[in-house]
Structure formats: C-alpha cells, structure tokens
Image: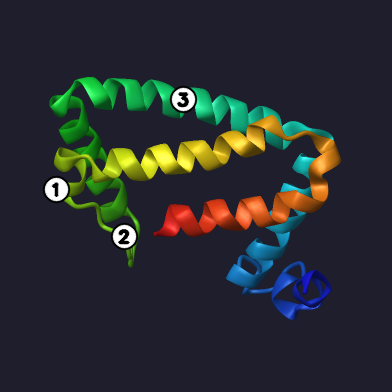
Amino acid sequence: ELSTFAADEACAPGSVRHASDRCLVASGAVAALIACASGALAKRSRDAVALLDAWLEKADQSLAFRLAAYRDASKTAGDKEGSLHAPQLTAFAGGRALANRRAFRDRLASLARSDGSAVDAAPAKLAELAALASS
C-alpha cells in the first residue's frame, strides 16, 4: 500500500537508508500515476515506441547490428552489480531478443494510445510491462 511505503522511516529525509528500494517504488508509483493523469505517459510511450520501431527495423535487417546490441547489453549487465539477467548471445543471434522486444513494444504501444482518462487502467499496464521487461 502506497501510504505504508511513504510512511516508512526509510523514506524519511536525511535517513541513511534514504534510497531504499521501498522508497523508490513508492516514488516511482506516484510519478507514474501523475504522468498518466497528465498525458505525459502516453507521449513518452509514443517516443519509446518510435525508438523501438527503429531498433527493430535495424535488427531485422542486420545480424551485425544484433551482435553489436548483444555486446552493448552485455556491457550494461556487467556494469550492474548483481545483475540477474545477463543477455545470451543465442537470443540476439537467433531472434528471441527481437521477439521479446517486439512483444514489449506492442504492450508499450497500448500505453501510447491511452490518454489521461485511462488512469485507472495504467497501473495494470505498467505492471504488465515491468513483468515483461524482467522476463
């Protein structure tokens, strides 16, 4: 519950644990709801869909591009301490990474088509995207 997160002492100003995961979750949830209500989430989603479309087009046409994307993803995963999802070369070479990104793009596009009137549906869509992104 959001009020429980916000009341947590880890979120208190000046706390040593100021940047705790629970506080970040609460802050992110509030920011997402505000962005959804203002229509900013739909605009950002449209921008991200356009970027994904460009990436997918290049990846569809070029194995070299997919291998470079694997290299970049590997570096990023290596930079994150305790990363759970190191990319697999076979996913990029064989097309599974493309299928995953295409599925993510399609779900993100549904957010891009929404407007501020769909605030009540946004948390479920965001949760769906987060689950897809972490799989």
Q: Earlier in the sequence, mark 1 or mark 2?
A: 2
Tag 3: amino acid? Leu
Q: Is residue 6 above or below residue 27?
A: below
Q: Which three-letter amino acid code belongs to the residue tagged 2?
A: His
Do we see residue 15 in this rendering?
Answer: yes
Dot 3 falls on a residue whose secondary structure is helix
Residue carrying label 1 = 90
> At numbered mark 2, what does the secondary structure look like: helix, strand or loop?
loop
Tell me the residue at 75%/73% (across/down).
Answer: 5
The CA span between labels 3 and 1 is: 23 Å
Which of discs 1 and 2 lies nearer the camera? The answer is 1
Residue where numbered disc 3 is placed? 51
Q: Which residue is mark 2?
A: 85
Q: Quadrant of residue 55?
A: top left
Q: Visible in this render: residue 37? A: no
Q: How many numbered marks are there? A: 3
